[in-house]
Amino acid sequence: MLAIETFALEKSYSVGFWRKRRVAGLKPLNLSVEAGEVFGYLGPNGAGKTTTLKLLMGLIFPSGGSARILEMAIADPRMKSQIGFLPEQPFFYDYLTAAELLDYYARLSGVPARERTKRVQTALARVGISQSARTQLRKLSKGMLQRVGIAQAVLHDPKVVFLDEPMSGLDPLGRREVRDLIQSLKEEGKTVFFSTHILSDAEALCDRVAILHKGELRGVGAVNELTARTESKVEILFQGVQGVTLLSALGAECHATGEMVRAIIPENRQDEALEALRRLGLRLISLTPVRATLEDYFIERLKKDEKAEKVEVGR
Amino acid sequence: MSRISAVASNTFREAVRDRVLYNLIFFALLLVGAALLFGQISIGIQRIVLVNLGLSAISVFGVVIAIFIGIGLVSKEMEKKTLYTILSRPVQRWEFIVGKFGGLAWTLVVNTLCMAIGFFAALYLLARHFERADGYLVVAIYFIILEFVVVTAVALLFSTFSSPVLSAVMALALFVIGTFAEDLRAFAAMSHGAMRVFATLAAYVVPNFASLNVISSVAHGQPVAASLVVYNTVYSLFYAAAALCGAILVFEYRNLK
Amino acid sequence: MTTRKSTVLVAAIVLAVSLAGAAVTVHQLDHLRARATAEEALYVPSAKILQGLSLGYNGLLADIYWTRAVQYFGTEHHLRSREYRLLEPLLDITTTLDPHLTVAYEFGATFLAQKPPEGAGDPDAAVRLVERGVRENPSAWRLYYNLGFIHYFERRDYAAAADAFERGSRVPGAYAWMKVMAAQMSQHAGNVQTARFLWSSLYETSDNDDIRANATKHLLALQVDEQVALLEKLVAGFQQRTGHWPANWTEMAAGGYLRGVPLDPNRKPYRLTPGGRVLVQDPEDLPFITQGLAEEPSQQQPNESK
């Protein structure tokens, strides 16, 4: 079953004094996420990731198109009792304690009275803030608030969990914990949809990712699929800074430390580079293939899009 | 239903932790201050002054609370984005509105009951006994509570679409005009043409606080007609329902920031 | 239907029903409270205290009390009340809050002074009110006119009336006829022409609908008084010539005394009694008349012609 589907889901805003100009927040989006997947929603800031999530949560209304979650409509309360949502930089009622907040949310999510206390305790323990359960939220640090946020997203045992930038504002330990949590959610058979601009996290966790840029979907697929599409590179270590100019001309990125130079060059120019070094009589130290990362794919993709746009505009 | 009561009790909790109930201290101080001044005025008028002062204070304090918390009920949540984790849950938007209304209304009822106890205590200290006419004081307090219900609903309506400052101004203006609603209707009857149409429309849309204020007549020991109680109750419920529906309709279509 | 559509539909329906219900209930409440708002005027210890409470918004509060005074009088008059005990306090509060609200003095001059059910029947209260008006508004010469009115018609104190017109005529900008009226007062007190002139000029110079309507009633009454006197003279003449009282108007018309059945201003025929008296058909519809009434008028009124 498809956990999340969108059908030409779009959102545009009227801006300007007379509200005449329309700015696209999200261009018509067609996306589907399988149940049980961990799906990464990537893109630079302002790409429209949060807009998409707000549309899916029913916080804002689409200018066109529609979406379904767990094969039910967005507004359906039955669907909402089976999803959890962690917004970016979550804000909570700061006059409540963590335990009170979670209890309130549990009531709203329809958790039966007898189970509530237990669920709340479990959720608090899961994110590691049991000691602060009785502290008013206004006194907690950002990292701890983030944990409370995660707790409220999972406490009612939802089938699909939506996380908007779950790692933001966390220290490396916190980020590790969140990664572990997402992993454990996956093991529980839940679908996880999370947005981020930190690609290494997505790479490690996700089954599939989508890349969003300026409101438009630029690529969807499994991580290794996407990285395979990226140009392969090799790393050449050699001695002699004279070689830098020549290799840069071939499209290499060079970093020199003393006499040692490290050049990253596209694989298809490998032979030319080696030939150049040989002609100069420079000493080759090592030649290593470099694994394409999601970041590479990402940047490359973005660059291509910008070029295409420039051509469009220039025309 | 349990969701509505969850929202309502949380709203009540927020008001309490916001130290709203501290206004009771000022009310108590006011009554004490009045008692100290009583020595200066003649005995016959003391009861009248106490009733006028006490009931007017209950009314004013409550209306101020109703407006200042009411205008933030929805706008504050939208501003602070606390709604994100609420509306992503099975709570329907209209349930949220009704719950918020219920919570604030309940806060005001509790506040008023505390004040009423203080007021009757002061009255007993003054008169050393209760008369039959004092029963009408309870009716006057009931009318004040109805007043709060209407003001809360109106403030909540404004909260769904307007910024706090603008909402406060509009709510206060409506309260003042509503106090003179009867005169506005009389004025409309006396005028002609476009002015008459406009004034009549305004006179019926504006909340009718005039009939809910029986403070000066109960101060003189005048009875309150049973029919007035019935009509006031019916009116307040209708008006509050209308305002709430307005709020529900507006909120149903609002895109959150 | 989606949950949103059903919510919107229900909310819209309840909204419409509630608004309608509220409007209907308000109507009922107004009826219930018709006298209550004015009564509350009695609870205010004094107009001065109210002034203090108004927090500087005297003018607005004065306008509100003015509206209430008019409303109060209209309601009571409609009920054919014989008592208007709240009129003076309401006008007193109004003019204390805003001493320059001239129309309030004019209203009081007419409706405080006149006898019930057309007024409160308290000319002295009216005089007090207008005297205050004159004190606070030295350039409002018309108020002297109102004052003269009260003295002339209700108190029948012609000397005081003349004095009022005299004082008014001295105010810069007063119309010339103020001086004329002062003279008339002393010489022709009780004259029909005087009365007619006073009421028509009041009608012409007032902006207030109630005062003008009232002046019209007086003018019609004068007309009736004249008509009745004239008709009785004709009937007496008929009796003298023919030796018997006419049985009906047709007989008089046949004799060339009249052109048809005489009608009063309400288009109802006058009644002819066997003894030669002419009576008005429905005297309640013609307030202020002094002739054509079933009982003999008890004393001579200024409206009578001499």
Image (cartoon, rainbow, N blue to C red):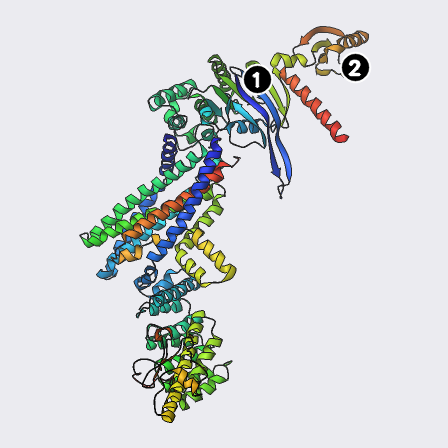
The reply to whether dot 1 and dot 2 touch (C-beta < 8 Å) is no
Q: CA distance from mark 1 to mark 2?
A: 36 Å
**Circle 1 residues within 10 Å: few <14, some 14–19, many ≥20:** many
- Chain of the residue that carries numbered disc 2 in the rendered image: A
**Circle 2 residues within 10 Å: few <14, some 14–19, many ≥20:** some
Q: Nearer the viewer, residue A175 or C189?
A: C189
Residue at disc 1, secondary structure: helix
- Which residue occupies 41% across, 91% down? C187
- Residue A246: which numbered mark, if any? 2
Q: Nearer the viewer, residue B13 or A36?
A: A36
- Which residue occupies 37% across, 28% down? A100
Earlier-in-chain disc, 1 versus 2: 1
Q: In this image, B36 relative to B70: left or right?
A: left
Q: In this image, C117 relative to C267: left or right?
A: left
User: Can residue A164 be seen by looking at this rendering?
Assistant: no
- Which residue occupies 46% across, 56% down? B200
Q: Residue C69 in the image: x percent, y percent?
A: 38, 66
Q: Residue C191 in the image: x percent, y percent?
A: 41, 87
Quadrant in the rendering for residue C190 = bottom left
Asked if C88 appears above or below B183 in the picture, the reply is below
Q: Residue A9 in the image: x percent, y percent?
A: 59, 27
- Residue A83: which numbered mark, if any? none
Q: Nearer the viewer, residue C179 or A183?
A: C179
Asked if C240 appears above or below B22 in the picture, the reply is below
Do the residues marked 1 and 2 share a common chain? yes
Q: Quadrant of the C terminus of chain C?
A: bottom left
Q: Amino acid at mark 2?
A: Leu
Q: Amino acid at mark 1?
A: Ala
Q: Nearer the viewer, residue B83 or A111?
A: A111
Q: Residue B57 in the image: x percent, y percent?
A: 33, 51
**Can you identify the residue that label 1 sits on?**
A202
